[in-house]
Image: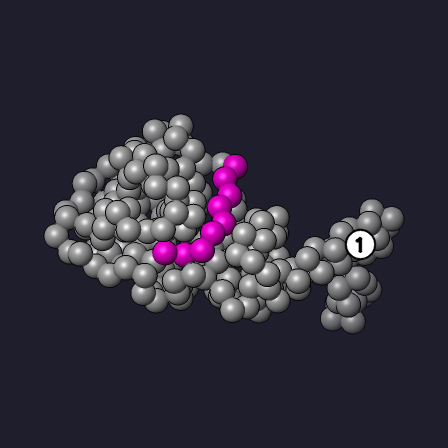
Amino acid sequence: MEQEAIIEALSAISTAILHEVLGKRHTLWPTIKPLWRPLTLCGPAFTVQARPADNLAVHWALAVAPRGSLLVVSHEGDNSCGGWGEIASVAALARGLRGLVTDGAVRDSEACRRLGFPVFCQGVSIRGTSKAYAGALNVPLVCAGALVRPGDYVVGDVDGVVIVPAEEAPQVVGRAQERDQAEARMMERLRAGELTVDLLGLRERLPGL
């Protein structure tokens, strides 16, 4: 599958389904939330290894990240300072980026919402950052507990964020679409009166049924 076809297909699948078909791997901490709701994002990762309370690496990424990429910024889990804000969102929109996922915090949240640039983060903080550490760009890193490599697909919705390894993406899309269809059939059977304990094979595990 071509990259744009993969992005389109992954965008139509919930993160919960992707999490399941990936063997419950590659999911970011549940503390990573959309800055507003409803909000989704999907795209290939351009990774940014920053330091706590420092966003120089973010500005470097805004200068060189290719159009169509999605920034994944690690602040090593520190959310004490707002490493992203309105200025960065304006710059990212002008550069044609698809969104931001960070284990840090952001500021200017209302302005970011009005701009519409998708942001998933670990909180909001008005505290400013230093700009002293250049960091590293487009390298494998761990963000919010998940390994992210350049080019891996990042999918976010109101339930969370999942990383789809690039080499697995076509197979993941196929398995996820099959699971979607299977769950749709299950819900039709539930509406017709069948029980989850039967459809999921749980009856023998429960006493008195």
Q: Quadrant of residue 205?
A: bottom right
Q: Label 1 crowding class (10 Å Cα cut-off): few <14, some 14-19, many 20+?
A: few
Residue 105 at x, y percent in the picture? 30, 45
- Above or below, comparing residue 169 to residue 192 in the picture: below
**In screen coordinates, is 116 left or right of 63?**
right
**In screen coordinates, is 48 left or right of 101?**
left
Among all residues in the image, which is located at the extreme left?
132
Which residue in the structure is indicated by mark 1?
185
Q: Is residue 45 magenta?
A: yes
* Residue plotted at (45% across, 36% down): 36
Residue 29 at x, y percent in the picture? 42, 57
Residue 38 at x, y percent in the picture? 52, 37
**In screen coordinates, is 197 left or right of 121?**
right
Going by the numbered disc 1, the residue's amino acid type is Arg
- Nearer to us in this view, 163 or 25: 163
Residue 29 visible in the shown view = no
* Residue plotted at (81% across, 63% down): 198
Q: Which residues, given as a range, are shown in magenta?
A: 38-46
